[in-house]
Amino acid sequence: MAENLLAQESELYIYADAAKNTEAQHEVNTLRDYLKDIRGFKTIHIRLRENNLGVDENIIQGVTEVIAERGKAIVLEDDLVTSPWFLTYMNEALNFYENEPKVASIHGYVYPLDPPLKEAFFLKGADCWGWATWKRAWDLFERDGQLLLDQILQRGLQQEFEFEGTYPYLRALAEQAAGNTKEWDIRWYATAFLADMVTLYPGQSLVSNIGHDSSGTHCAASTVYDVELRQTHVNVETAVKPDREAYLAFADFLRNLPSNQASAPKGLLSRSFKKLKTMLRSKGSTKPV
């Protein structure tokens, strides 16, 4: 990200988690030595965790701490590569939509869609591969996955939440609610979705996720999410409402994913699906999941 056009004007906060076991200690030490040599930013703040929090809690606490101090934050995990225009897009959008209460966040990644969508658009909810938000929105973040799940079921929003039933977001939320996973991003998506808030996306991705090589915590090996990064400026001004064309394009992309490329918890989906059907019957819902 140091090659971004605004990098030298940006303050960088790094949250390095502690080793989860003795086997991971060497790699953690190597990473922490590397962090000392990072250059190219206005200021660099390195926060070394003394105890292992895990990726999800480390992100939640890190975002909360930076937003409490700065009022807003641009968030990247360590497996994301950005276009040189990423920070420009993020900062311009953060400034332009800062006082628009319906906007939950700004997102930098978009699926490799063909044909591409318009230059910038909104979708309901929130996302997690290179994003930004403000205190007013992050204060709404709901940690209780069960509460979020109950609201989606009670309001009959399962189909919309899962992009016309094309991706198992509801089951991912159910697994988190049951304590089988700790995923923060499904709760962030559900929080913004239930608040009827929207997130801005670029028509062509400004972020590439290189974590789909089996080495990460949540993602299996895959090339289906690979993108060509946009190398030009993005006009962030667009109507603040969900874009139906983009919603359907996302649904088509997700519908055509190979069955083994869904990022939701894999070994637990069957059991979760049975549990959800039981919950739906008990609540009298007729919407499919």
Image (cartoon, rainbow, N blue to C red):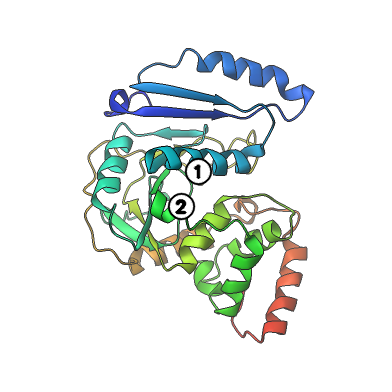
Q: Point out residue 221 in the picture as x, y percentages from the top left corner.
A: 62, 40
Check contact, mark 2 vs mark 1: CB within 8 A: yes
Quarter that holds the N terminus: top left
Residue 219 shows up from this direction: no
Quarter that holds the C terminus: bottom right
CA separation in Å, label 2 and label 1? 8 Å
What is the number of the mark on residue 64? 1
Residue type at mark 2?
A: Trp
Q: How crowded is mark 1: few (under 14 residues within 10 Å), some or many (20 or more)?
A: some
What residue do we see at 56% from left, 58% from top?
A: 142
Q: Point out residue 4 in the picture as x, y percentages from the top left corner.
A: 31, 28
Q: Residue placed farthest to the front in the image?
A: 69
Q: What element carries label 1?
A: helix
123 vs 230, nearest the viewer: 123
What is the number of the mark on residue 162? none
Residue 167 shows up from this direction: yes
Residue type at mark 1?
A: Thr
Instruction: Say whether disc 2 or disc 1 marks the residue closer to the N-terminus.
Output: 1
Q: Mark 2 points at which residue?
A: 138
Q: Point out residue 136 in the picture as x, y percentages from the top left corner.
A: 39, 54
What residue do we see at 50% from left, 43% from top?
A: 64
Image: 23 above or below 277: above
What residue do we see at 31% from left, 51% from top?
A: 203
Q: In this view, does 248 lie to the left or right of 150?
A: left
